[in-house]
Amino acid sequence: MSHRSAESDAGSLPAHPRRLDPPEDFPVTWPDPQDAELMWTHETEHSSPLVLPCHVAQRHWLADGMTAAARLYGAPLAGRRGVRINTYWYDTTLPLDAPPEDLARRAREGEALKAERGEDLARWWEERWQPELAQLLQHWAAADPDAWDDAALADWLVQSEGPFRRMWEIHFELVLCLFPTITAFGELAADLFGSDDDPISGHELLVGEGNATLQASLALWDLSRTALGHPEVLAALEERDPAAAERRLAGSAAGQAFWAAFRIWLSEYGQRPDERREALGANWDENPTVPLAMLRAHLEAPASHPLDGWRRRRAAREARTAEARQRLADYPAAVRTAFEDQLSRARYATKLVEDHNFHLDQKSFYWYRRAVLAAGQRLVQRGQLHRPEDVVFLELADIVQALAAAGDRDQLRQRVEAERAALERWASVSPPDRLGTERPSGLPTAPTPTPGPADGRWHGVPASPGVVQGRAHVAPSLAEASEVQPGDILVTVTTNPSWAPLFPVLGGLVTTVGSPLSHGAIVAREFGLPAVLAVASATAIIRTGDWLEVDGLRGTVTPIEEPG
């Protein structure tokens, strides 16, 4: 899905507030007419493009957590609001109205707190944030919706606001320390080593730490190697339907053992959806269609274990680190100490970028979804819904109200069908990146990227070094990506940890959004996968089957002729 900006002169700065007219195929009705005076943006890197009604409350809670963390660190922020327009989510930031001297004081104090926590990141994570997250998650995991009456279930859903908001407050307290820590080390490395003929980049000194995302990918790879030793298991895995695959595997001792091992993998790593935070479909431990497809892709991949490549990259990292230390041998002790301290913190922070997502981002939505589906089952028993999963088409207030009173059984069904139709309608429309009123910001607006290659190639953000040539596999969704062939160059909007089990079989990665510190970039570097991110309109202008050369160091994607 490509995205458009509402009408605006690219590369110019408006002298006065200017209303952005939405495209003709994206009419906008504001909940409050005054909302049209604000600047709203549609973010796609972290969240699902289409937002289900049941996730609207969570979006608001998440924004509250983000606001609390940002204000803690001195951001001049009064709040962050969101609104669902044509099934897409738009956010706006409300500035804090305070005297300039108060804003300056808050900024100084917030930056000092952020720096203090960044310098002691391991202690904050291991002794404060992670234990609190574990406690919150254990409270949710211990919940037993099936044992509750309707009133207790409704109350649990409403009371989830506090824990959910706190989890995302921790999320932003953490990430607002993580990225400055990694960036600061990158800047230090550039200052110390960037001018040499053989520059040492900060990123190459940070690979090889490992993380939960990498562990999930390697564990799935190990399962694929187990399957290769048993023809009856391989035959069963040809089934695209998980239930059919399970039935065939049950026919042999090797198949039963394999399925048991796969279920253990799902219990550890399957508490996640196919896509980003919210999901239209089931989580993997409910419906393992996608991880089974990933496993089949692994079966076709070369025999070399991806862990071997990871160990080689870690060894290369250590060699480059030793070289960096040698170059610093004649520097003052204070410089050498700063290098070692920042290197240690940046490596830990890089690992936490992935690990916090595994512990927090994915599981917070997972447990909430379980309770929502339990409510859906109750409403099916009452005859108010056709299927339990239809409950995702209702907002939280509607679900709670329905649990409290039987009501008109046709009313909820009609609302579900209306929402389902709306999602189908708007899924084929590209939402504008911005809506509302553009105001002078003191910064020039970025020019609109051209959809064709300049100088014979497309340019993006260098994310993971290396040069590779291969066949493009364009996949806006993970379900489409799971059919990738070994050596293909994956072209997509963005990736998240759910995509990582595909990385061992890929040849390269190209995305339309992202940065060197995004999930896709970090995991690509762990696997030694050449990657270029933020290639504008890549999913629209590149076709599956096109041949590409990806240069992850220079940040270029070049169309080439198919070899041979």
Image (cartoon, rainbow, N blue to C red):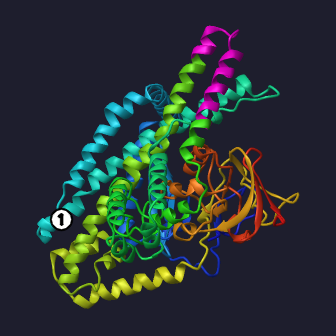
Q: Residue 241 at x, y = what percent?
A: 42, 77
Does the image show residue 383? yes
Q: In front here: 245 or 229? A: 229
Q: In front here: 560 or 164? A: 560
Does the image show residue 443? no
Q: Residue 25 at x, y = what percent?
A: 62, 81
Q: Quadrant of residue 261?
A: bottom left
Identify the residue shown where x is 63% and y is 48%.
Answer: 515
Q: Residues within 10 Å of mark 1 (few under 14, many from 20)?
A: some
Q: Quadrant of the C terminus?
A: bottom right
Query: Going by the image, does 451 lie left or right of 383?
Result: right
Q: Residue 443 at x, y = what percent?
A: 70, 48
Identify the residue shown where x is 48% and y is 45%.
Answer: 354
Disc 1 marks a residue whose amino acid type is: Pro
Extreme residue in the right direction: 455
- Let me know if residue 182 is in the magenta part: no
Under circle 1, the secondary element is helix
Q: Residue 471 at x, y = what percent?
A: 72, 65
Residue range corresponding to the magenta coloring: 313-337
Q: In front here: 350 or 81? A: 350
Identify the residue shown where x is 50% and y is 35%.
Answer: 349
Which residue position holds label 1? 145
The answer to whether 426 is drawn above or below residue 172 in the figure is: below
The answer to whether 320 is drawn above or below residue 145 in the figure is: above
